[in-house]
Image (spheres, helix red, strand yellow):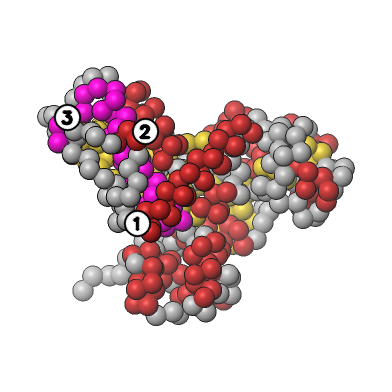
């Protein structure tokens, strides 16, 4: 008989009101007034990206417009965002995390998972002691507060960092998990977006406890493989690993690869293939109500040598136009123009529920690209509807038409 493996000790660390907190380190006087970082503070349509503790008292929320926030709090101080500075702070915070474990997985600009199992010797095995030391060091050395969730799996660790904040540690362990996790709304659970929450609500599932106690087979029948994952997540059975930087594989990903009838040679071959593959990836993301933070391409040449490269995109996306643009950028950067490509795979990695992504701080888009985005979004959602009604072959995007690469239609099922 083999001994059961001991539980892992996983932290999810979340910087509290990250952009606003960083601004306060430069201008401490902002701490005593309601303040928000806004995409375009001069415009009524500018979007609130982060707010400080004082502004929270006015119920100002992320992703609302400057106009609506000012209505709630006319004296609100608005500060424009500084991407470069935020990513420098992100580096500094993660440099502290990395002193505690080699397994630090960044999840967006202000969140990271850390697996400290096996790194707790100097804490006498006490994960909470370790978490509190990290929390205090970030506060002392970087002057921002973080909240940490501690649990045996990533899903509950993430719930924990949100459970009590700012500047707090929440331990969700085998003894207390049902008490803490079960009463929370199902929509708090990782991967449960608005659409999924609505569908669950119709089945009478409102809390994570409802979900955990629901019939597993019924969930599978209703949502497929995703339903199984929901059941697993709600019951603390998720075993996905914390991945160190560069380990590639994400928590979950959606990808599509194709070996073409003939090798891709010209720029237009590559564009056709990318259009086809990113359309298929984007359609599947939308179908499951996800956006991806990272776009990855894998390229195989005629000797079956392959490379895999990825990039984080400016804001999470489920649009073929954006995923395709990122894929083309990666190919242009990492593959010699004209070198034959036998197989190309595009995937969306680091998935987040679409509606969670919408309100995410990362959406630092400026106004014109936001409008552009909205237009692409409408177009692609319309494609989804047509395909739903008339089948996947009903719409073939322009540059795919008449190709000799073996691509006949959209293979999304
Ligand atoms: Mg945060």
Residue mark closest to the camera, 1 vs 2: 1
Q: Is residue 185 above or below residue 194?
A: below
Checking the image for residue 263, the label placed there is 3
Residue pointed to by mark 1? 390
In the image, residue 285 lies in the stretch drawn in magenta: yes
Q: CA distance from mark 2 to mark 3?
A: 18 Å
User: Along the line of sight, which residue is nearer the eye, 68 or 31?
Assistant: 68
Identity of the residue furthest to the top in this view:
337
Mark 1: few/some/many CA within 10 Å (<14, 14-19, 20+): few
Span colored in magenta: 261-289
**Residue at 44% across, 61% down:** 153
User: Along the line of sight, which residue is nearer the eye, 50 or 317?
Assistant: 317
Q: CA distance from mark 3 to mark 1?
A: 32 Å
User: Along the line of sight, which residue is nearer the eye, 361 or 31?
Assistant: 361
Locate residue 302, reporting x and y percent: 13, 29
Checking the image for residue 123, the label placed there is none
Check the picture and name the quadrant holding the C terminus: bottom left
Locate residue 339, reporting x and y percent: 21, 21
Look at the numbered disc 3 and give the secondary structure of its residue. Answer: strand
- Is any part of residue 144 visible from this angle? no
**Residue at 67% across, 52% down:** 167
């Amino acid at each position: 008989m083999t001994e059961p493996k001991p539980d892992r000790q996983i932290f999810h660390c979340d910087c509290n009101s990250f952009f606003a907190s960083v601004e306060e380190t430069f201008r401490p006087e902002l701490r005593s007034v309601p303040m928000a970082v806004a995409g375009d503070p001069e415009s009524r349509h500018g979007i609130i990206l982060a707010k400080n503790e004082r502004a929270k008292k006015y119920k100002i929320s992320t992703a609302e417009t400057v106009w609506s926030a000012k209505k709630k709090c006319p004296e609100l101080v608005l500060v424009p965002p500084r991407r470069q500075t935020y990513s420098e702070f992100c580096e500094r915070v993660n440099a502290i995390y990395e002193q505690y474990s080699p397994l630090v997985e960044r999840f967006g600009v202000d969140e990271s998972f850390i697996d400290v199992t096996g790194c707790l010797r100097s804490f006498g095995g006490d994960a909470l002691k370790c978490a509190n030391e990290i929390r205090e060091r970030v506060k002392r050395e970087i002057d921002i507060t973080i909240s940490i969730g501690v649990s045996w799996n990533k899903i509950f660790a993430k719930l924990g960092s949100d459970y009590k904040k700012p500047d707090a540690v929440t331990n969700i362990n085998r003894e207390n998990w049902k008490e803490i996790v079960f009463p929370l709304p199902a929509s708090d659970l990782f991967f449960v977006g608005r659409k999924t929450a609505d569908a669950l609500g119709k089945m009478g599932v409102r809390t994570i406890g409802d979900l955990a106690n629901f019939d597993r087979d019924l969930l599978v029948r209703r949502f497929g493989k995703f339903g199984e994952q929901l059941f697993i997540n709600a019951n603390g059975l998720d075993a996905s690993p914390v991945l160190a930087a560069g380990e590639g594989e994400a928590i979950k990903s959606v990808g599509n690869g194709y070996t073409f009838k003939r090798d891709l040679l010209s720029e237009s071959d590559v564009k056709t293939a990318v259009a086809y593959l990113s359309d298929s990836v984007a359609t599947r993301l939308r179908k499951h109500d996800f956006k991806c933070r990272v776009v990855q391409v894998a390229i195989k040449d005629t000797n079956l040598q392959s490379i895999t490269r990825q990039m984080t995109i400016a804001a999470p996306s489920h649009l073929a136009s954006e995923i395709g643009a990122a894929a083309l950028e990666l190919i242009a950067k990492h593959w010699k123009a004209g070198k034959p490509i036998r197989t190309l795979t595009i995937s969306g990695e680091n998935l987040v529920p679409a509606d969670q992504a919408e309100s995410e701080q990362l959406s630092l888009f400026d106004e014109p690209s936001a409008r552009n985005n909205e237009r692409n979004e409408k177009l692609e959602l319309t494609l989804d509807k047509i395909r739903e009604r008339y089948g996947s072959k009903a719409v073939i995007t322009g540059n795919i038409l008449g190709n000799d690469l073996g691509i006949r239609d959209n293979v999304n099922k």
